[in-house]
Amino acid sequence: MLVNNAGPFAEHDRESAEPAAWPEAMNGNVLSAVRMIRALTPGMRERGWGRFINVGSRAATTPLPNMVEYSAAKVAVVDMTTGLAGHLAGYVNGFNLRVDGGIAPVP
């Protein structure tokens, strides 16, 4: 089982978010999870069992005006989780997305 719960956040509004902050948010919140999933998926396939839990945020559906790049990165986490769940169905037993207070299975 892998739980992806790493990722930076910074407080920037749309005017103060520098261009360099956007790839930093994506790298820390999305690409870090992608790297871990890619590293562990082959072993899960070999064993015929595995589970991924990606930690999301309500910011994905209700963007935070003072954390704009973080909110955008969490939207990408939701999309990535949904896409990978379909792609790895049959190899990995479960993809879940945890969002502030609960764990929701991804269809």
Image: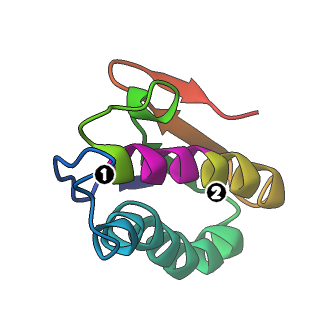
CA–CA distance in space, label 2 to label 1: 21 Å
The verdict on residue 76 being magenta is yes
| Amino acid at the residue labelled 2 | Trp
Q: Give whichever of 69, 98 is nearer the camera.
A: 69
Residue found at the far front of this picture: 15
Mark number for residue 5? Answer: 1
The boundaries of the magenta stretch are 70-78
Q: Give whichever of 13, 29 is nearer the camera.
A: 13
> Which residue is painted at 70% across and 70% down in the image?
45
Q: Where 59 falls versus 10 (above or below)?
A: above
The color scheme shown is rainbow
> Which residue is painted at 64% across and 57% down in the image?
49
Contact between labelled residues 1 and 2, with CB atoms less than 8 Å apart? no
* Quadrant position of residue 44: bottom right
Tell me if 50 is positioned left or right of 67 in this view: right
> Which residue is painted at 67% across and 35% down in the image?
106
| Amino acid at the residue labelled 1 | Asn
Q: Residue 25, percent across and down?
A: 33, 63
> Which residue is painted at 16% across and 46% down in the image?
11
Q: Give whichever of 74, 91 is nearer the camera.
A: 74
Q: Residue 2, percent across and down?
A: 42, 57
* Quadrant position of residue 84: bottom right
Q: Which callout, 2 or 1, points at the residue further toward the start of the chain? A: 1
Of helix, strand and loop, which mostly describes the magenta segment?
helix
Dot 1 falls on a residue whose secondary structure is: loop
Q: Residue 76, percent across and down?
A: 56, 53
Tell me if 72 is positioned left or right of 49 in this view: left
Q: Can you identify the residue that label 2 sits on?
A: 49
